[in-house]
Image (tube, rainbow, N blue to C red):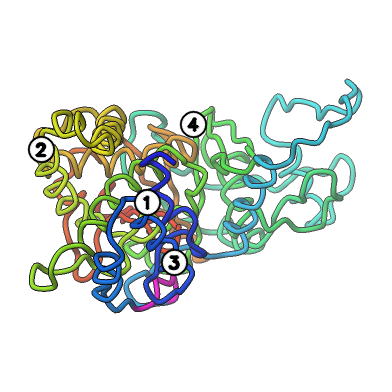
Amino acid sequence: MTLDELLLEWSYRSERGYPSVDNPSDVSILKEILTKLNLSEQEIDDVLDNLPDEPGGDDLTNPGTDGMESSDVENEKEKQVQDKQTDNTEQPEEKPEDKPKENSAGDSQYDDVIKYHLGLQEGQSIPRVENTYAWPGRGGSTFNIQVKGNDLKHWKDFWELTPPKAGKEVGTSSKGTGNGEVALYWLYQHGGAPGVNVEGTQGSDNPDLEFNGIGVEVKAFGKAHEKARGLGRWSQDKDQLDALGILFGFQKLVSVLEPKSSGKLPPDISPNNFKGYQLKAAFEFMDKLLEVDLEGLGKEYPIFLSIKSRLDSLIAKLGKWEDPEDGARRMAVYFISPKVGRKPGDGGFLTHVLESGDCRFWQFDVEKLKNHPDLIAQKGQSGYIGSASSNMYVEFDHLLG
């Protein structure tokens, strides 16, 4: 068994995806790890006796997690990802006549949903948007719009409309689409922004809409824009999970070996439950470990060569960091980038919409995010980025505003 398996096993094989000292099964896994490290029974018993008391992991309903989206929408999209990853059955060959027709303008599925809702007959047109709304396109920045006049009446009427699942009839709803998405499509496709073509991109981890090919991810938390922060589950990003597992795995393993007087790691810290400001402390420890001549020790104790291999793997993922803060920033951006890269994509927009017609658009700029002074800062008991119960959060308004 390699060190990779030894150090990450506690997290990856735990029942909740991260180790809990209150769970006998997780403690048993830790004992197995320590046994394979050739510790004596007395040393193993000392470690287990000194494990910290641990409350339950973060929950999206607890204080401090406002704006996280634990909804049918995100759960359905995550299920689609998992189904896609695990379904290896052979699919029947698609015939040309079965393929959906491409839309030269707009999205026929969204239009059909609106027509069905309004009871429009063949030849009747969808109502046009009366006012004009801003759309800066690529290279834009944060901006707000307010739906007004008769447009607001239609906006509210279309607020809960959703396109059907693939293969289902128009008029049936899909949990994969949230409130406000069809309304926003109508607002920009049907006269609200001349020259803008809007299409849906229904898929497990695609942006909800595209405006002239630019991704737009739509969120409707039902709260003030300043509270918007949820990006949904990120468990499919295995490289990021592995990098955080290396970082926190070494830190956690050493913390249970240290005397109580030296302090303990926060009990909930793991790849699936951490706050951005905790990354710096983890890299402070990592830098101390890198000062050790692991290669020299490995000549007599091969396990140290395995440790060096894992550390080299982390450096290969992030690049060589200058100091703990630089390492923490690199890890933060590495953690966020894949999810953002898919929805809405670097340069795309995340949009928070309210039923009142108040909408805010933030443009994702990875470089801007990387250099933000508060990227890894502490905010009360939380941070501006992190993961809570495997759900990624980013303080949109603070970091992208």
Q: Label 4 to label 2, Cα distance in Å?
A: 48 Å
User: Could you say where residue 342 lies in the image, as x and y percent from the top left?
Assistant: 49, 36
Q: Which residue is mark 4?
A: 214
Q: Label 3 to label 4, Cα distance in Å?
A: 49 Å
Mark 1 lies on a secondary structure that is helix
Amino acid type of disc 1? Lys
Q: Label 1 to label 4, Cα distance in Å?
A: 51 Å
Q: Mark 1 vs mark 4: which is more N-terminal?
A: 1
Q: Which residue is mark 1?
A: 36
Q: Nearer the viewer, mark 4 or mark 2?
A: 2
Label 2 packing within 10 angstroms: few (<14), some (14-19), many (20+): few
251 sits to left or right of 103:
left
Magenta extent: 55-61
Amino acid type of disc 3? Ser
Viewer-side residue, 324 vs 102: 324
Q: Label 1 to label 3, Cα distance in Å?
A: 13 Å
Label 3 packing within 10 angstroms: few (<14), some (14-19), many (20+): some
Mark 3 lies on a secondary structure that is helix
User: Could you say where residue 14 lies in the image, as x and y percent from the top left?
Assistant: 48, 61
Q: Which residue is mark 3?
A: 28
Q: Mark 3 vs mark 2: which is more N-terminal?
A: 3
Amino acid type of disc 4? Ile
Mark 2 lies on a secondary structure that is loop
| Total marks placed | 4
**Does 37 appear above or below 157?**
above
